[in-house]
Image (tube, rainbow, N blue to C red):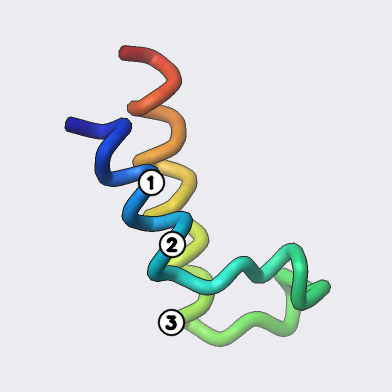
Amino acid sequence: MYKVLARINKVLLPSFSKQRLDLAKAKKWQLAIIGWKYFITKKALDS
């Protein structure tokens, strides 16, 4: 299930690393997306 979510995240959600986003200057919604992508990626790699 997490692997499917990880693929959906990759397609739908923006990649902030490609945009060279500074985490210190990131807005709350950007931090929420980063946290969500991290959580799903970690779970997908563990399973």
Q: Residue 11: percent from the left, percent from the top?
A: 43, 62
Q: In which quadrant is the N terminus drawn?
A: top left
Circle on res. 26: none
Q: Earlier in the sequence, mark 3 or mark 1?
A: 1
Tell me the distance, in whole angstroms, between the alpha carbons under discs 2 and 1.
6 Å
Q: Residue 46: percent from the left, percent from the top?
A: 39, 14
Mark 3, residues whose alpha carbon is within 10 Å: few (<14), some, or many (≥20)? few
Tell me the distance, in whole angstroms, between the alpha carbons under discs 3 and 2.
18 Å
The residue where tag 2 is placed is 11
Q: In which quadrant is the C terminus drawn?
A: top left
Q: Secondary structure under badge 2?
A: helix
Q: Secondary structure under badge 3?
A: helix
Q: Residue at x 39, y 41 (%)?
A: 39
Dot 3 and dot 2 residues touching (CB under 8 Å):
no
Q: Closer to us: mark 3 or mark 2?
A: 2
Mark 1, residues whose alpha carbon is within 10 Å: few (<14), some, or many (≥20)? few
Amino acid type, mark 2:
Val
Tell me the distance, in whole angstroms, between the alpha carbons under discs 3 and 1.
20 Å
Dot 3 and dot 1 residues touching (CB under 8 Å):
no
Specify whether 3 is left or right of 42.
left
Residue furthest out toward the top:
47
In this picture, is 36 found above or below 32? above
The residue where tag 3 is placed is 29
Q: How many marks?
A: 3
Q: Earlier in the sequence, mark 3 or mark 2?
A: 2
Amino acid type, mark 1:
Arg
Q: Residue at x 44, y 30 (%)?
A: 42
The residue where tag 1 is placed is 7
Dot 2 and dot 1 residues touching (CB under 8 Å):
yes
Amino acid type, mark 3:
Trp
Q: Secondary structure under badge 1?
A: helix
Q: Residue at x 34, y 27 (%)?
A: 43
